[in-house]
């Protein structure tokens, strides 16, 4: 089964410091922002923790960043995607 995790940065509030959250379906996890890490490393830490809590999601995850700053992590579970086929885009000649 294919899986995707979305991670998002949450600014500090009067009650909580900055944090990064990860969600996949109904599951979610929030970690405190680690200022010793780079932005992408904080998002990776949240995605890694989410993947640990999910069953059947061991292996490689591929990340991309959306225009709003969120990251999307897609589970690479082999030669076929959820839709049954993978695709490859060739460069224009």
Image (tube, rainbow, N blue to C red):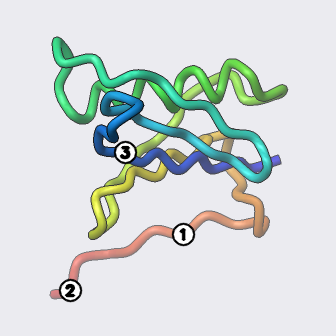
Residue 10 lies, in percent from the top left, at: 37, 45
Residue 39 lies, in percent from the top left, at: 21, 34
> Could you tell whether 93 is left or right of 83 in the image?
left
What is the secondary structure assignment of the residue under circle 3?
Answer: strand
Residue closest to the far front: 14
Q: Name the residue carrying label 1.
A: 87
Q: Name the residue carrying label 2.
A: 92
Q: Which residue shows up at 74% across the image and 22% down it?
A: 53
> Relative to the observer, which residue lies in front, 9 or 37?
9
What is the secondary structure assignment of the residue under circle 1?
Answer: loop
> Could you tell whether 55 is left or right of 45 in the image?
right
Q: Are marks 1 and 2 in contact (CB under 8 Å)?
A: no
Whether residue 12 is situated above or below residue 82 in the rendered picture? above
Which is nearer the N-term, disc 3 or disc 2? Answer: 3
> Relative to the observer, which residue lies in front, 81 or 46?
46
Whether residue 50 is situated above or below residue 70 in the rendered picture? above
Residue 81 lies, in percent from the top left, at: 70, 58
Which is nearer the N-term, disc 1 or disc 2? Answer: 1
Q: CA distance from mark 3 to mark 2?
A: 40 Å
Residue closest to the far top: 36
Residue 71 lies, in percent from the top left, at: 39, 50
Whether residue 38 is situated above or below residue 6 in the rendered picture? above
Q: CA distance from mark 1 to mark 2?
A: 16 Å
Q: Which residue shows up at 33% across the image and 41% down it?
A: 13
Q: CA distance from mark 3 to mark 1?
A: 34 Å
The quarter of the image holding the C terminus is: bottom left
Numbered disc in front, either 3 or 2: 3
> Relative to the observer, which residue lies in front, 79 or 68?
68
Q: Name the residue carrying label 3.
A: 10
Residue closest to the far bottom: 93
Graded by Cα atoms within 10 Å as few (under 14), some (14 to 19) or many (20 or more), the crowding at tag 3 reads some
> Could you tell whether 72 is left or right of 78 in the image?
left
């Amino acid at each position: 089964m294919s899986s995707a995790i979305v991670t998002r940065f949450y600014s500090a509030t009067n009650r909580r410091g900055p944090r990064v959250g990860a969600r996949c379906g109904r599951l979610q996890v929030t970690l405190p922002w680690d200022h010793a890490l780079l932005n992408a490393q904080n998002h990776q830490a949240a995605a890694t923790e989410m993947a640990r809590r999910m069953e059947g999601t061991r292996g490689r995850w591929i990340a991309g960043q959306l225009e709003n700053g969120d990251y999307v992590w897609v589970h690479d579970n082999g030669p076929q995607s959820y839709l049954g086929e993978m695709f490859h885009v060739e460069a224009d000649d």
